[in-house]
Amino acid sequence: MPRLPKRVKFRKEMRRVRDRKATKGNYVAFGDYGLQSMEGVWLTARQLEAGRVAAQHFLKREGQLYIRVFPDKPISKKPLETRMGKGKAEVEYWAARVRPGTMLFEIGGVQPDLARRALLRVAMKMPVRCRFVGRRVTV
Amino acid sequence: MKKTVNLAATTRDRLGSRYSSRVRASGGLPAVLYGHGEAPLAITLDAKEATRHINSGGRVFSLAINGAEQIALLKDLQFDYLGDTIIHADFARVDLNEQVEVKVHVKLVGEAVGLKSAGAVLLHPASELTIKCRVTGIPEEFEVDISNLEVDHSIHVREISVPEGVTILTDPEAVVATIHMKKEEAVAEAAAAEGAAEPEVIREKKPDAEDAKAGDKKDAKGAKDAKPGAKPAAKPAEKGKK
C-alpha cells in the first residue's frame, strides 16, 4: 500500500522548483549502503512502494531497509476533457521531493554484494538514474 | 595509530567561493588552518594527494606551509552534493602531546551466533565513537567482536575495551551492535493499509458541524429580525428565475 501523510496542514500545494542539488539527506546515515538519486524528480508513493517491495522480496528477511524519503507532497491533476479554470484540481497522488544527490534507500546488516544486488533491483523501479554508494569517511 | 602525513601547502590571499572554485579547477583543495589562539590561515593543498591520505584514514598531518612545518589535526570536511569529492578541509593546529576529541569508526568482527536464525538482523546504531586522547595515540578504528552476540542482545559502549590513554566520551549506554528479529512483512502491510485513506487536514473546520452551526445562527437571526406580521424574505432560487 503506498504511503501518505497522516495529517497535513493544507490539502493542496504549489508546485515549486525541483532541480536544485541536495544539501541534506545526501549521504548514508542509517545503514551501510545506499541508493542515491542522480537526478531530481517527484518520486510518487507508488514508485517508492515498488522499490520497497522489490528490495524486501529480494532480501527476504535479511538486513534492514531504510526509506530515506517520504511522499508528503500532494500533486493535483485536472480530469480529462476539463476546461481550464474553476480552481485547483483535486489531489491525484502523493510524491516525495527528490533532488540530485538525495539518498533514496539504505540497507544495513547485509554483505556488500547482497546490498548491491538488492539496490540494483530497486534502481530498476526508480524513474531516475541512481547509483550505489557506501558510507563516507569518518572525521 | 596512523603515521603523521606530510603535505605541502601554500597560503591563499584571495578568499571566497569564486576563488575557491578556481583553486579546485586548477587541482588544488582549499583548506583552512586555525586554533591555538592564532589567526585562521587559508591554505591550498594538492587535491589528489590530500584526498588520497584522507580517504586512507589520515588524521594528523604535518603541513609544510611556505616552508614552515605545522602539525595539524583534520577537523572537518565538506563534500559536494553527491558526497564524492572533498571540496574543503578544516585543520586545527595541535601539539603532539595535546589531548584532542575525535570520532573513531567501530568495526564489527566475527560471525554472530544470533545471525544464524532466519530473520535476524544485525544493526550497529553507534557506528562511530567520540573519544579523547593524545594526538599521537588516535586509534584507526575500534574492533568489536560480535561472535557471541545472540538475538535480542546488545553490545554497549561501556563494554568496549580501549587502549590506555583513550577516554570514550560517547554515552556508555549507547548501543554499538544489536541483533533483533525482523517483523513479518504482512503485519507491516496490514498496518499500512489501515492508515491508508485521505490525510486529516489540521485546523480544517468540519463541514457538517459548521453547516449546522451556521444554520442555527441564521435561524436565530431571522427570528430576531423578523417583525411580527412581516412577509418572509424571498428565496434565492426565486431570484434566479428572473
Image: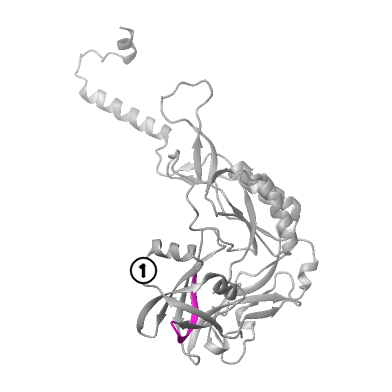
Query: On the rendered structure, is A31 left or right of B77?
Result: right
Position in image of residue B172 (x %, y %): 57, 80
Q: Nearer the viewer, residue B52 or A11?
A: B52
Position in image of residue B80 (x %, y %): 51, 61
Position of the C terminus of chain B, as image quadrant, is top left
User: Can residue A20 be seen from the camera position used here?
Assistant: yes
Residue depicted at x 44% and y 77%: B10
Residue B122: in magenta span: no
Mark 1, secondary structure of its residue: loop
Residue depicted at x 60% and y 92%: B164
Query: On the rendered structure, is B55 left or right of B24?
Result: right
| Chain of the residue on which disc 1 is drawn | B
Instruction: Give the vertical position of B227 relative to B125 (above or below).
Output: above
Residue where numbered disc 1 is placed? B14
Position of the N terminus of chain B, as image quadrant, is bottom right
Q: Nearer the viewer, residue A135 or B123?
A: A135
User: Can residue B189 be seen from the camera position used here?
Assistant: no
Res A88 quadrant in image: top left
Q: Nearer the viewer, residue A90 or B46?
A: B46
Instruction: Give the vertical position of B114 relative to B165 (above or below).
Output: above
Instruction: Give the vertical position of B204 relative to B80 (above or below).
Output: above
How many numbered circles does the render carry?
A: 1
Res B40 quadrant in image: bottom left
Position in image of residue A83 (x %, y %): 46, 21
Magenta-highlighted residues: B66-77
Residue depicted at x 55% and y 50%: A70
Instruction: Give the vertical position of A62 relative to A3 (above or below).
Output: below
Q: Nearer the viewer, residue B67 or B73?
A: B67
Residue B70: in magenta span: yes
Magenta stretch mostly in which secondary structure? strand
Position in image of residue A134 (x %, y %): 64, 63
Query: On the rendered structure, is A6 left or right of B213?
Result: right
